[in-house]
Image: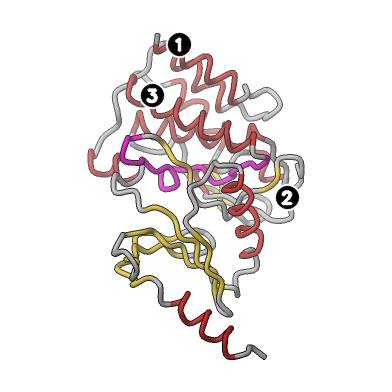
Amino acid sequence: MLDITDRIRKAIYKHKYIFLKKIGSGLSGKVYTARSVHDQSVYAIKVIKKDNHIWNKELEATRHIASKGEFNLVEIIENEEDVRIVMPYYRNSDLYNLLDNRGEGLPEKDALKITLQILKATENLHQAGYVHLDIKPENIMFDRDNNVVLIDFGCSEPFDKEVLDRYIGTSYYVAPEIDHFRFSTKTDVWSIGICFYVMIKFCFPCELVLNYNDESCPDYDQISDNVNNVTELSGESKSVLKRMLIRDFNERPSVSELIVDIENILK
């Protein structure tokens, strides 16, 4: 049983922020804007219910990644019923809203610059020991200097684990190896490749089908044809995109290789 001081401490923590509005939903929880009672600053808070069986894995990944300096964590508030991850509120929004507000794809050079930033942020995450496994426009934020920030580590796993105990990711961005509960750092490369395609075409490169696990996943057979038909990219950029979306993850280039390739294109 909690003593009186614990009850008071938890009550204070629970009411440190005034929730304003919901701004998104992840696989493991909902994200809100909230105002600090202390200094009136606005933050983003992800609320993860403890009845979600992966809440502790996300908490562990978030703490580890923040400890390596790859995620700007304000604080974590844990209550009996939920965990609240408090982080900066990026007013410049995310890649999804950037594209949605435009209503069309980006010019090649702009898409390459954003892809390069995503790759660099992902490389830092990998160096911190984790694979993201849910890279998508909604999880790609822009800070006030328009630098890319990766968020939401609900699917993240230590990169040396290699075998998954669950089917994870967001349908259109799921790499082929996830069907077999395998992953590597190159699994994030696939998802970034889909983001690159979406930035150019403002649509997905395939439809969704059910795999043998009865999970919704991309129709991988459609992807190579649609990538081959992209006319908005130069030959060099199209080659990069095609290599990112090679089905065999062992044959896919690494994040560091792609960073060099795109930097050379942008020179």
Q: Residue at x 36, y 38 (%)?
A: 203
User: Going from the N terminus, do you reach mark 2 or mark 3 first?
Assistant: 3
* 2 or 3: mark nearer the eye: 3
Say what amino acid the circle numbered 1 marks: Glu
Determine whether label 3 and label 1 are within 8 Å by CB: no
Question: Which quadrant does the C terminus fall into?
Answer: top left
**Most distant residue in the left direction:** 102
Question: Which quadrant does the N terminus fall into?
Answer: bottom right
Q: Name the residue under label 3.
A: 113
- Quadrant position of residue 215: bottom right
Q: Name the residue under label 2.
A: 164
Gap in angstroms between the C-alphas marked 3 and 1: 14 Å
* 3 or 1: mark nearer the eye: 3
x and y, in percent, of residue 238 in the image: 45, 17
Q: Which residue is drawn at 47% across and 17% down?
A: 262
The answer to which of 230 and 75 lies nearer the viewer is 75
Q: Name the residue under label 1.
A: 236
- Quadrant position of residue 108: top left
Say what amino acid the circle numbered 3 marks: Lys
Magenta residue span: 129-146
Q: Is mark 1 on a helix, strand or loop?
A: helix
Gap in angstroms between the C-alphas marked 2 and 1: 34 Å
